[in-house]
Image (cartoon, rainbow, N blue to C red):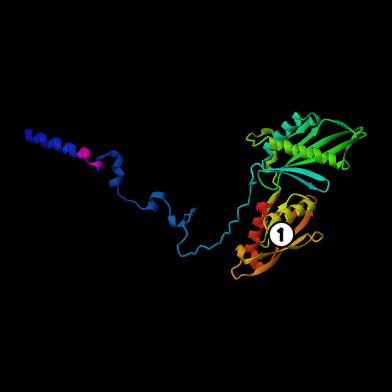
Amino acid sequence: MKLFFFIFIFFIVSCASNPENNKSNKYLSAKDRESVEKILGQNISKSVDLYPIPTTDVEVPKKVYELPLPKQYFSSEENNELRLHKLGEIRWIYLSLEPSKAWPMLQEYLNENSDLNISKANPETGEIFTKEIDRNNLKNRFVFKVESGLQRESTEIFISNEILNGSTWRKNSEDDEYIKSVSTNILNGLSEMGSVTGTSLVALNLNSADKTEVFVDKDGFSKIRLMVNFPRAWSALQRTLTIAEFDINDFDREEGVFITEIKSEEGFFGRGETKEIKIFVEKIAQNETIISVFMEEQDKDIIQEIISQINQVLS
């Protein structure tokens, strides 16, 4: 009796431990007994395959994709650099800070100066107007325009003086020494503020207006687009070539061309050659110019390097 009992228990345990006896695993022992045609009730050869698998003997066409070069951006190297520029009747202050940081600095300086208190300020356009000033029996005011510089994280503050003529403000270009004195005082005042870490949230939009863009034309030549007028672009390029230590052999402002040369020791050539190159400034629109380098078709890599150097120093 006991032997029969142990055999019965062993049989039950064996059945329970066999995974094939589990209902969830019944599919493991299932067998195909009917054809697909019989199951579907139709001839599958006439069915439409909506997702066909391509045959392996069909060659996939080889395509070459050229990824465009990323845009070149260079930030101002000197964190505390300030300069006063003059081009004709135009004066501006250069700061190696982004406009959203320069904006509150300029406001703070003007508010602390009794002669240049702010009348109105518009962070959307970057314009600041001072209150009326009585000078030489005339009412005048200063207008400041804060813009993004040619380099990222740089600012240009344009300074102009206006005289009230009847009910209209007109630009004053006759009192140059007075405008120069005020501009110099602002430059010194901003420099005394030291480094600035704060930024103006209302003036953040001024940071996004880039004036410089490196692009490749339809023929594959690298060029620089500047959103400034021709005199400004010409002056900026002349300064840039000097800083970048290009030897300017000649130039023609009417033709918009600088003639310089590159020597082998600068890393462009391997046979000790010296090549003359022409760098052009071309006016496209009132406030749009193009800087390009004229060389042969096979020198595209050299042109790209020259454009990169100019773009890095341009300000």
- Residue 18 sits inside the magenta stretch: yes
Q: Residue at x 89, y 42 (%)?
A: 174
- Residue 270 sits inside the magenta stretch: no
Secondary structure of the residue carrying numbered label 1: strand
Q: Give the camera-side residue of 190 and 230.
A: 190
Q: Give the camera-side residue of 10 and 298.
A: 298
Position in image of residue 6 (x %, y %): 11, 35
Dividing the picture into quadrants, the one containing residue 216 is: bottom right
According to the picture, the residue beneath numbered tag 1 turns out to be: 292
Dividing the picture into quadrants, the one containing residue 245 is: bottom right
Q: Amino acid at mark 1?
A: Ser
In this picture, residue 136 sits left or right of residue 146: right
In this picture, residue 273 sits left or right of residue 52: right
Position in image of residue 285 (x %, y %): 79, 52
Q: Residue at x 83, y 40 (%)?
A: 179
Vertical comparison of 234 with 109: above or below = below
Q: Residue at x 69, y 35 (%)?
A: 192
Position in image of residue 206 (x %, y %): 70, 39
Magenta residues: mostly which secondary structure? helix
Vertical comparison of 57 with 168: above or below = below
Vertical comparison of 38 with 118: above or below = below
Q: Give the camera-side residue of 92 and 31.
A: 92
Crowding near pointer 1: few (<14 within 10 Å), some, many (20+)? many
Magenta segment, which residues? 15-19
Answer whether residue 125 is visible to the viewer in this image: no
Dividing the picture into quadrants, the one containing residue 304 is: bottom right
